[in-house]
Amino acid sequence: MTKILEISRSRLHGGQQLRLQHHSSALKCDMVFGVFLPPQAESDPVPVLYWLSGLTCTDENFAQKSGAQKLAAELGMAIVCPDTSPRGTDLPGEHDDWDFGSGAGFYLNATQSPWSDHYNMYDYVSRELPALVETTLPVTDQRCVSGHSMGGHGALMCALKDPDRYVSASAFAPICHPTETPWGIKAFTHYLGENRNHWQAWDATQLVPTVTRQLPILIDQGGDDEFLANQLRPGSLEQACICTHHPLEVRIQAGYDHSYYFIASFIGDHLRYHARALELETHSH
Amino acid sequence: MTKILEISRSRLHGGQQLRLQHHSSALKCDMVFGVFLPPQAESDPVPVLYWLSGLTCTDENFAQKSGAQKLAAELGMAIVCPDTSPRGTDLPGEHDDWDFGSGAGFYLNATQSPWSDHYNMYDYVSRELPALVETTLPVTDQRCVSGHSMGGHGALMCALKDPDRYVSASAFAPICHPTETPWGIKAFTHYLGENRNHWQAWDATQLVPTVTRQLPILIDQGGDDEFLANQLRPGSLEQACICTHHPLEVRIQAGYDHSYYFIASFIGDHLRYHARALELETHSH
């Protein structure tokens, strides 16, 4: 029986914003995650959007900065926000860099020591955490997934590696081709080792031809994002999707940057996109 | 000629979220403030909501956490967020306490050394900053004022001390009677000295009978706010308003706490309240 500790609970838009702590068996450490429960969850279980955050974030950034809960409360969607890496493990060098180690788990399962003992974020966000929330909170197994930057790539991986587990997928400014861009190369070298053949299973662009089912993907990307050309490369993913006729919509939003202000500006569109896939009734504009 | 330095600019809901730095003559230090400019400001000057934040906040909390800009972009309102105290002054003991000194300017003009050299936040937020933004940004002199907790009291003071300068006023969980509650007593003792006769001009409840014009006030207060009974005391303000027939609406919101989740839940109501006072056309629900 998994024990969950309630760290905080705040009323928000008629629902509840929670921070919950539990011991993760995939990560072998205690983890905190955020949950927004809409008012509808008081009477019936609701579907869940899993939101995967970017480098340096915690479970709190999306909850505090996206403004997503207002519309989620209207639509009747829960939002679950995991942290971005194992915590409290203090591995050698784990906290030295902002783009690797703590806060930078990259939503993969590491194979290299010492990371492989704890850094199994893919199993955590796609298996252990959904199982936990679906057995302990008033939510269904209808799952949507989205995320930002590193977490945008995490969302793409969830959709591409195991599309049957998700109803819909979207991403904000995702890293699209980490095996060819600096953040990804650095992280994959540490987590997965030097042999690049082992990287393919964790690269969205390389996963596109391998899918068992084509789950449509919506991407919003800021046109003035400072990381667009060097780190994110949506064109690589688009090319892979064109070659395999994988449904993908990439919207370049002129003038927007990589910040949460960009996410806040378009999260409503994404929630409605997921709500349509979930066939939720919406009376909002 | 005042020089303004642009620290950052992000596109947000079709408008712009800015952080701007300038030298304040009232505070004798460099100050940073936030401005949201709605899309309408590209063609015509727009009215301004001045938002005064609470203890420990900076110019950024409201911009990042309130979600107010989405509706402000629809209504055509700018939002100006000053910092909560002078910065960079390093007075003796200034940074020792979270409820006094830096981050805790209480929106008054200090009379006691060494605070009186810099801690003139009332002049700053009600005079210098509006004059600055009205001469340098595409905004009008139609001003609304609101705030949270310490900043809620600041908003009440602006409305009560100089109602002709504002079109409308509201507050979230304001400190209502600081001369009788712990945060206020501590701050006033330092900033204004031991003689309590000099405190009355900076206490909203005591200011109510002195007003030259009655500006209606809307207050939202969380029913589960941990500071309600000990620090905030809306009942004192209500009593003073009843005695003088000052228009005041206090809404106790059951289950809500003191956090930004409470503000995010009701900021839309406040923006619409101010928009009605400004006679802005709104097509939103």
Image: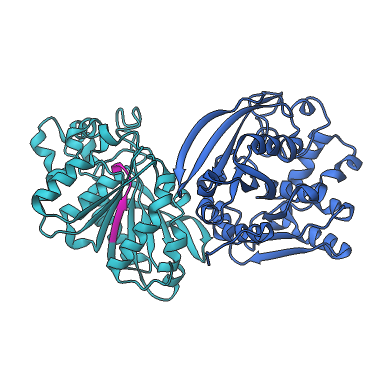
Chain colours: A cyan, B blue
Q: Residue furthest front?
A: B43
Which residue is nearer to you in this view: A200 or A194?
A: A200
Horizontally, residue B152 falls left or right of residue A206, namely: right
Which residue is nearer to you in this view: A283 or A175?
A: A283
- Residue range of the region highlighted in magenta in the rendering: A144-150
Q: Is residue B129 visible?
A: yes
Relative vertical location of residue B33 with respect to residue A34 in this rendering, above or below? above
Place of residue B170 in the rendered image (x, y in percent of width and height, measured from the top left): 69, 56
Relative vertical location of residue B241 with respect to residue A160 in this rendering, above or below? below
Horizontally, residue A279 falls left or right of residue B204, namely: left
Place of residue B277 in the rendered image (x, y in percent of width and height, measured from the top left): 69, 59
Q: Is residue A282 magenta?
A: no
Relative vertical location of residue B221 with respect to residue A151 in this rendering, above or below? below
Place of residue B244 in the rendered image (x, y in percent of width and height, measured from the top left): 88, 62
Image quadrant where residue A214 sits: bottom left
Image quadrant where residue B81 sits: top right
Which residue is nearer to you in this view: A230 or B64?
A: A230
Horizontally, residue B112 falls left or right of residue B135, namely: right
Q: Is residue A146 magenta?
A: yes
Disc tally is 0
Q: Quadrant of the N terminus of chain B?
A: top right
Q: Is residue A26 visible?
A: no
Residue at 31% x, 65% y is A134
Place of residue A128 in the rendered image (x, y in percent of width and height, measured from the top left): 26, 56
Horizontally, residue B121 falls left or right of residue A115, namely: right
Residue at 59% x, 46% y is B79
